[in-house]
Image (cartoon, rainbow, N blue to C red):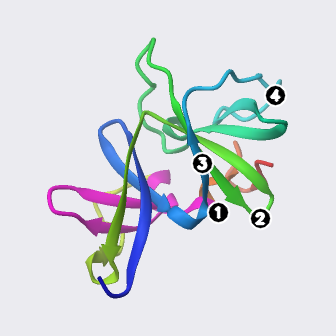
Amino acid sequence: MSNANQFCTFYLDRLLFGVELQKVQEVIRYQDVTRVPLAPRVVSGLINLRGQIVTAVDLRKRLDLPERPEGKLPMNVVMRTEDGGVSLQVDEIGDVVEVSEESSEEVPPTLQGVARELIKSACKLQDRLLLVLDIEKSCQFSENPAQVQRLV
């Protein structure tokens, strides 16, 4: 496949998302989270990943999706960012997929709200639509839209 990109995929509320594989540090099961007082609602807390302190972000909250069903624990996709590791809490881990650049399109107009700002593109797969997440934007947040803060 010429001009192909690889994505680590995961599910949130039955939607398929992907992040660029080269930015993924690792994928791990649920980790205990230490809550952070006064943290924005999208920050679940901090996890200790073999001595490395990583901020855990609940992607459901970040994308304004419904709450995770009670009793269902999130999985973690640990990403490498310019400022260090960030764990994206997701519902379920998918596969690594290779997608040609030709199948990538702009964000569909039906996607509204904060999700529209955080999705870089949409890729048509054989039976699904893959929404490619912008990691840098996803790791910025603020309770006040006029002010943007870094997670880590």
Give the percent coordinates (x, y) of residue 2.
33, 87
Kindly check if marks 1 and 2 are in contact, taking CB atoms under 8 A apart as contact: yes
Callout 3 amino acid: Glu
The amino acid beneath tag 2 is: Glu
Query: Label 4 belongs to which residue?
Result: 38
Q: Would residue 147 be seen by someone viewing this image from the given angle?
A: no
- Element assignment for label 3: strand
Residue under label 1: 136
Specify the farthest residue to the bottom: 2
Q: Residue type at mark 1?
A: Glu
Residue range highlighted in magenta: 114-136
In which image quadrant can residue 15 be found? Answer: top left
Cα separation between marks 4 and 1: 22 Å
Q: Secondary structure at mark 4?
A: loop
Q: Residue at x 54, y 30 (%)?
A: 29
Mark 3 / mark 2, whichever is N-terminal: 3
The reply to whether the C-beta atoms of the residues labelled 3 and 1 are less than 8 Å apart is no
The kind of secondary structure element at disc 1 is helix
The dot on residue 26 is 3
- Residue at image position (32%, 59%) is 130
Q: CA distance from mark 3 to mark 2?
A: 16 Å
Does residue 116 show up magenta in the picture? yes
Q: CA distance from mark 3 to mark 1?
A: 17 Å
User: Alpha carbon of mark 1 to alpha carbon of mark 2: how far?
Assistant: 9 Å
Q: Is residue 144 left or right of residue 123?
A: right
In the displayed structure, 108 sits above or below 76; it is below
Q: Give the percent coordinates (x, y) of residue 73.
A: 50, 21
Label 2 belongs to which residue? Answer: 82
